Structures are given as C-alpha cells and as structure tokens.
C-alpha cells in the first residue's frame, strides 16, 4: 500500500507538471479538484506517524492551498504558478526517492532514514508555506488599498 500511494503522488506531480504548469494558458479549474482529491486521499489511506503527519500537512496545507490561491484573482497568478512549479518539481523528486526505497524504513521511526525523510518533507512544506503566506499577504494588502 505504501509504495502505491507514493506512485500515485508521483503521478499527480507528473500530471500537474505536464498538463498545467508547462502549458502557458492552462485552466486551473481542470486541476484544482484533481490535486485536492489526491492530497486528501493520501490522508485517508495512511497510518498516523510523524512522517505521514508531515506529508499530510504538506499536501493539505501547502500543496493544495497553492491551487486554492491560483483560483482566486486577488493573488498574483504568475508568481503563484511559478512557485507551484518549483514546489511540484521538488516534491516529484522527493516522491521518486521514496518510491525507490524499500518501504521497511517507514516502520523504524528512530532510524536515521526515517528522521531524514521526515525532516525533508517538513522543510519542503515550511519553505513553500512561507512563500505562499507572502503571496497571500501581498494579495490581501493590495485588496485592502
């Protein structure tokens, strides 16, 4: 199950890249619901541990939120889409690393590999959450003027 979930996440990043990010005049509405469903689906199918909690936080509160922001004209579409592209690429690389691992590390919460992967997804989430918050703050300040 673990491997299949990560292959599904990898596939999502590939679809988002090739069908949304790489196409200049792509329509966000075609991919917003898709990304939302994939992000929440991961949460529903995984066991609770610190790694999966960090992944859930990343998917729901960062990855999915980029699509919500892109759907709102109040925020800078190009900056948001550009950062989604960067984040998507980094997350795709992360997914590939997880897919290429034997899944036994997920059961060893005290192992260095477990700790490293947990920290890596947390750092990725923090990095793009800070950028997202800046985009939102900028849009909100322009809206109030």
Image (cartoon, rainbow, N blue to C red):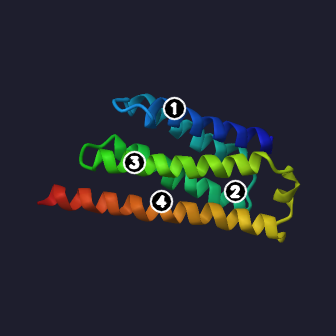
Quadrant of the rendered structure where residue 118 is? bottom right
Spatial separation of the CA atoms under disc 2 and disc 1: 27 Å
Q: Secondary structure at mark 4?
A: helix
Q: Secondary structure at mark 2?
A: helix
Q: Give the class, few, some or many, for how many residues have Cα within 10 Å of label 2's Cα (few <14, many ≥20).
A: some
Spatial separation of the CA atoms under disc 3 and disc 1: 14 Å
Mark 1 or 4 closer to N-term?
1
Mark 3 or 1 closer to N-term?
1
Q: Is residue 127 above or below residue 28?
A: below
Task: Nearest to the eye among marks 3 and 2: give it.
Answer: 3
Q: Give the class, few, some or many, for how many residues have Cα within 10 Å of label 4's Cα (few <14, many ≥20).
A: some
Task: Nearest to the eye among marks 1 and 4: give it.
Answer: 1
| Residue 128 marker | 4
Q: Which residue is mark 1?
A: 18
Q: If the image is split into quadrants, where does the N terminus sit?
A: top right
Q: Which residue is mark 3?
A: 82
| Residue 52 marker | 2
Q: Residue at x 15, y 59 (%)?
A: 144
């Amino acid at each position: 199950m673990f491997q299949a979930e990560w292959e599904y996440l990898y596939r999502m990043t590939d679809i988002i890249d090739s069908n949304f990010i790489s196409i200049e005049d792509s329509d966000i509405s075609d991919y917003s619901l898709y990304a939302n469903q994939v992000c929440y689906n991961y949460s529903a199918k995984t066991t609770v541990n610190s790694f999966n909690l960090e992944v859930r936080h990343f998917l729901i509160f960062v990855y999915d939120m980029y699509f919500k922001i892109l759907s709102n004209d109040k925020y800078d579409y190009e900056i948001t889409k550009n950062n989604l592209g960067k984040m998507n690429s980094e997350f795709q690389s992360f997914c590939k690393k997880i897919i290429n691992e034997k899944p036994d590390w997920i059961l060893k919460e005290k192992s260095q590999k477990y700790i490293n992967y947990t920290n890596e997804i947390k750092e990725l989430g923090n990095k793009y959450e800070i950028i997202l918050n800046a985009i939102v703050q900028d849009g909100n300040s322009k809206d109030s003027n």
